[in-house]
Image (tube, rainbow, N blue to C red):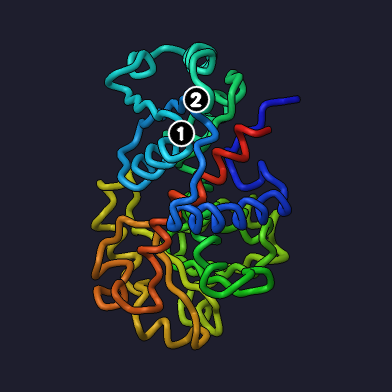
Amino acid sequence: MATRHFLTLLDLNPEELKGLIERAIEMKRDLAQIRQREPFKNQVMGMIFEKSSTRTRASFETGMVQLGGHAMFLSPRDTQLGRGEPIEDSARVLSSMVDIIMLRTFEHQKIQRFAQYSSVPVINALTDDYHPCQLLADIQTFVEHRGSIQGKSVTWIGDGNNMCHSYINAARQFDFELRIACPEGFEPNSELVAANKNRVVLHRNPEDAAKGANLLVTDVWASMGQEDEQNHRLEQFKNYQVNAELMSHAASDALFMHCLPAHRGEEVSKELMDEPKAVIWEEAENRLHAQKALIEFLLNQ
């Protein structure tokens, strides 16, 4: 059987994703009740980070330990990848020594090439184009609070970045409507939008996009690697802040999510971060549980 990877949400079918979310909720409950098992004793996850991380590293490392295994942190400063070793060589060698690999990098093509030459499952822990693990946590959080997201309306406010791309894939896989509000010139990938035109709509006016929505989501206006664009982006996105006024256009029980880190007072108002509708802290914790379910799924294939 071919090795299964998780590079985008499209690598699992809708039923597999639904089952994974259910398993994540179950594993979260088991951990709280001290009923967890350690099925992957003596198995090792290689964690390759070419971008900085807090939640991703902590959640994957903790999750692998809780499953009975070990997580090994590798940075470009410590490996031959950082000195120009071909991706396919690193993939072949590392996958011969560990049981599963997660990679946080820049170009999405890099992780695709790495997976092509890896003999063990590879997980996308973030690329410039996609962040599928965060979407698993987001969907889990919504399900825990409001039940199935199927048929619901979700509004993305801000940059058409890797998180936005993963929300487009999520709309397809979990069957919900996605409205994207972004300034001109900051739209998500046009081919991805066109391929999902039956459930994705672009807006310029955030209020129009938020009307009656069940979930509002945003991210920083300048992602990693875009720091030199910070001032320009602040000007372009100044009318795209998620705050109490914007939330008032959504459904009365709408939730707010943010993948973090957040710039309070920029893409999200300071007060909204601490409102009951903001489920961002549970969303962050659920990275642990969703990724444990993902690791279990891939290692059991």
Q: Is residue 205 visible to us here?
A: yes
Q: Is mark 1 on a helix, strand or loop?
A: loop
Asked whether 2 or 245 is in front, the reply is 2
10 Å crowding of disc 1: few (<14), some (14-19), many (20+): some
Image: 273 above or below 132: below
Circle nearer the N terminus (1, 2): 2
- Residue at 72 percent across and 25 percent down: it is 2
Image: 86 above or below 266: above
- Residue at 57 percent across and 67 percent down: it is 143
Residue linked to disc 2: 43
Image: 260 above or below 71: below
| Image side of residue 87 versus residue 272, left or right | right
Asked whether 226 or 211 is in front, the reply is 211
Query: Residue 167's x, y, as percent?
Result: 56, 58
| Image side of residue 21 versus residue 204, left or right | right
Query: Residue 108's x, y, as percent?
Result: 51, 35
Residue linked to disc 1: 68
Query: Residue 158's x, y, as percent?
Result: 42, 64
